[in-house]
Amino acid sequence: MPWGEKTRTDSQGNVTKGWDHDPPAKEKLVPFGILILASGALTLLFGNHETSDFWGDCLRAWWISVRSKHRKIRRLVIYLDNGPKNSGVRTQFLKRMVQFADWSGLEIRLIYYPPYHSKYNPIERCWSSLQKKWNGVLLKCWEIVEACALRMNWKGVHPRVMRIEGNYPTGVIVPKTEMKEINKRLQRSKALRKYDITITPKRTRGR
């Protein structure tokens, strides 16, 4: 619903501006969720804009927070929607995934849900649970957002909640010459080239 600006004039002719709804927030927070299907452990990360770089930073921050508990993991399978910021043809996203694989030492496999099938992604049900916790709450600052997020639970467990600082400009494109090298690192399925991609790290993760 658009914000409606109202004005009021007093007996001396002084004009005061007001709003017929709550005023726009001074900052925007975008939620990002990572759900470990095997255990049900949920991590919610919040930033100011959803971009490919935000995706990459969230994944890195999440792995730093959980890797000590998953020392035996050598391969990470990521199920995700085929959105514009993280699609199998988004150059900056693919660049960040290659960088993450090399940094973490993990083999990364990206598995995409087909278009219009995101409802089958379990993370979507996590969002509905989160919305119930802040339904009717005025989310006017990070502390309130964080408190609401910490109150929700998934399979009886409260999520880990983090905030990712930084500005994330849109429209970042990888130059064609650089993208040629990145494409060499992408092992695409012959049958589903855009929906099943494996990235092998330059070094494997140590034990």
Image: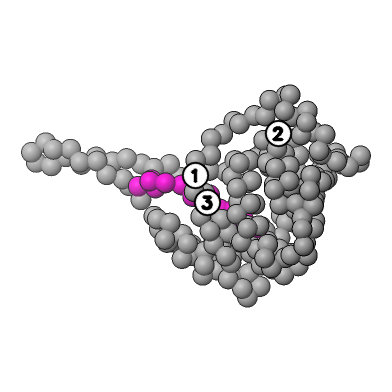
* Separation (CA) of disc 3 from disc 1: 7 Å
Residue 125, quarter of the rendered image: bottom right
Instruction: Tell which circle, 3 or 2, labels the residue nearer the N-terminal end.
Output: 2
| Mark 2, other Cα within 10 Å: few <14 / some 14–19 / many ≥20 | many
Instruction: Tell which circle, 2 or 1, labels the residue nearer the N-terminal end.
Output: 2
Residue 34, quarter of the rendered image: bottom right
The residue closer to the viewer here, 181 or 31, is: 181
The residue closer to the viewer here, 79 or 63, is: 63
Q: Quadrant of the C terminus?
A: bottom right
* Separation (CA) of disc 2 from disc 1: 21 Å
Residue 108 is at least partly visible in this image? no
Q: Which residues are magenta?
A: 23-34
Q: Locate residue 65, reporting x and y percent.
A: 61, 61
Q: Locate residue 124, reporting x and y percent.
A: 66, 57
Q: Amino acid at mark 1?
A: Gly
* Residue at the farthest bottom position: 156
* Circles 3, 2 touching at the beta carbon (< 8 Å): no
Residue for badge 2: 91
Residue for badge 3: 164
